[in-house]
Image (cartoon, helix red, strand yellow):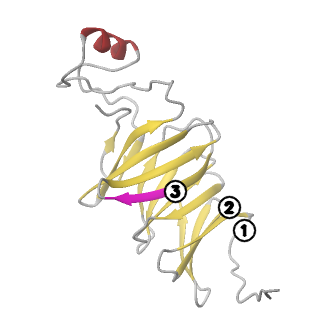
Amino acid sequence: MALAICRQILQGHEKFVHSVAYSPNGKQIASSSGDQTVRLWDARSGALRHTLQGHDSSVWSVAYSPNGEQIASGSSDKTVRLWDVASGECRAVIEGFDESVQSVAWKTSLGGTYLVTGSEDKLFRQWQLIEKGDEIHVRLRWMSPYAQLGVKDTLLEGVRGLSGINVALLKQRGAVDKKILSEPSVMSKSRRWYQKAQF
């Protein structure tokens, strides 16, 4: 029978700790809590490196990006925040959830970087993350169930290959002919950007 030995007790959170994750290189630990913060710890010494503040409610889930440079955190404030690990700066805020975000997970492939989120609104969503300079732009790729067609404020101008019936249906569901960005789902440092569907 294996014997477990407690090496360290990391103290600092003021409420329940909901989620913990090792960085890909194993040198850092991230923790999320009901105290509305994410904290980054040195895995060897237990020293607190950063306290990430910005959520307005409990933080339920935290996950490192595959390269270890960013962290995603999901919260009861119905947002996901993307953080820079080195600086502790919030790079982007993903909105558009109807309930608390309970789970987040990353994937990187030749096709790009993706984030999957699960929320109490009974939906999971896949987002594509696109870095442009010091900004991160986020596209909602799809969400479950597929029966729900979410195209509000999607720009149809210049789209090719759609029949007249399909264009009419998309307009009925909220797509637009002109560039109208009335409900941004992502806030970055200097620009708001939104897209509900991709053609």
Visible in this render: residue 55? no
Q: Which badge, 3 or 1, comes first in the chain's sequence?
A: 1
* Relative side of 113 to 161, left or right: right
Q: Amino acid at mark 2?
A: Asp
Which structural element holds mark 2? loop
Which of 35/28 is in front? 28
Quarter of the image for residue 124 reads top right
Left or right: 111 as drawn, with respect to 102: left
Q: Compared to 79, does 159 lie above or below?
A: above
* In the image, residue 159 above or below residue 72: above
Task: In the displayed orientation, state which residue is furthest to the front.
Answer: 1
Task: Write down the residue under mark 3.
Answer: 105
Mark 1–mark 2 CB contact (< 8 Å):
yes
Kindly identify which residue carries mark 2. Answer: 35
Residue depicted at 25% across the width and 9% down the height = 164
Q: Residue visible at 54% across and 38% down?
A: 97
Q: Which mark is residue 95?
A: none
Q: Where is residue 3? Give x, y as percent.
A: 80, 88
Q: Which residue is mark 1?
A: 14
Q: Nearer the viewer, residue 158 or 53?
A: 158
* Residue type for callout 3: Ala
- Give whichever of discs 1 and 2 has the lower sequence position: 1
- Determine if residue 143 is in view: yes
The magenta span reads 105-109
Which amino acid, mark 1?
Answer: Glu
Q: Tags 3 and 2 in contact by the CB under 8 Å rule?
A: no
If you read the primary sequence from the N terminus, does the residue marked by circle 3 or circle 2 appear first? 2
Would you say the residues marked 3 and 1 are in contact, meaning their CB atoms lie under 8 Å apart?
no
Label 3 SS? strand
Q: For the residues carrying marks 3 and 2, which lies nearer the camera in this image?
A: 3
